[in-house]
Amino acid sequence: MTPFTARSRRRHAAFPAPAKQRGVALFVALVAMLVLTLAGLALVRSVDTGGQVAGNVAFRTASIVAANYAIEEAVYNLYKAPTPIIVNNDDTAKHYYSTLQANELTDGTPEALSGPYPPTKYSMSVWTDPTTNVEVRYVIERVCTADAKDKAPTIGTCDLLPPKVSPAGTDNETKRIPLPVIPHYRVTTRVDVPNTNATTIAQTFLR
């Protein structure tokens, strides 16, 4: 063996050829980037959802005040106004119907207050906040069937409450004066914020 050949072999043994790259580091980096991207998207989605929930809660709080305003006006027109509603007849100027309206939704919302903004069958606005542009509408319905229209309420046609009568009497009492039964009234309010999808429907019963 020549000296040159021995030196060449020793040099080859001291400096081995580099191993081939298999791409493991690149694969790990891509997976890490994918995980970080998904985490960022989840964070953005969570922030958007939180903002929507906060907005809905704020609108619900504001709509309660507006709905109470409509209910108080209904109470005034039914019981306290100098010229109260004649309950046996419809009075659309005061948003009153002597019977339950037909074609109401399954949740009890009258058709007049249903549908997208603005309600096409009931465009009269009761009250508009000049700052927020919140619009309030309401309908008063006597809880009676169509057979009670233009008539006094009866047991067969209306949901009635017996009058409160004191059990006490007097020695000279011969016959008590019969008191009329008390009908129920359903007040449905709708609160809208124009140019948004925010709508609140509320109901209460009066007697």
Image: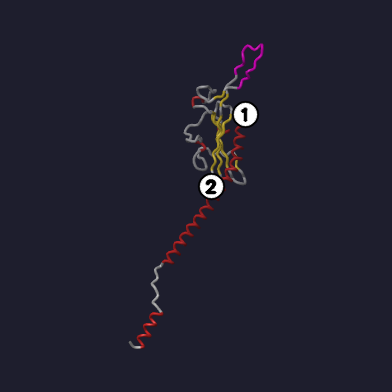
Q: Quadrant of the C terminus?
A: top right
Rendered view: 176 above or below 92: above
- Residue 64: image location, x then y, percent: 59, 40
Q: Please name the residue shown 39% across and 73% down the image.
A: 19
* Residue 188, disc: none
- Residue 97: image location, x then y, percent: 54, 30
Q: Please name the residue shown 48% across and 32% down the image.
A: 102
Q: Secondary structure at mark 2?
A: loop
- Of residue 137 and residue 83, the one placed in the foreground of this image is 137
The answer to whether 71 appears left or right of 10 in the picture is right
From the image, tell me which residue sits under label 1: 79
**Furthest-right residue in this view:** 171
- Looking at numbered disc 1 in the image, what kind of residue is underneath it? Tyr
Q: Which residues fall within the magenta stretch?
A: 164-178
Give the spatial CA distance, label 2 vs label 1.
Answer: 35 Å
Q: Quadrant of residue 23?
A: bottom left
Q: Main secondary structure of the magenta part?
A: loop
Contact check, label 2 and label 1, Cβ < 8 Å:
no
From the image, tell me which residue sits under label 2: 196
- Residue 125: image location, x then y, percent: 57, 39
Q: Please name the residue shown 58% across and 24% down the image.
A: 182
Judge the density around disc 2: few (<14), some (14-19), many (≥20) Cα neighbours within 10 Å. Answer: few
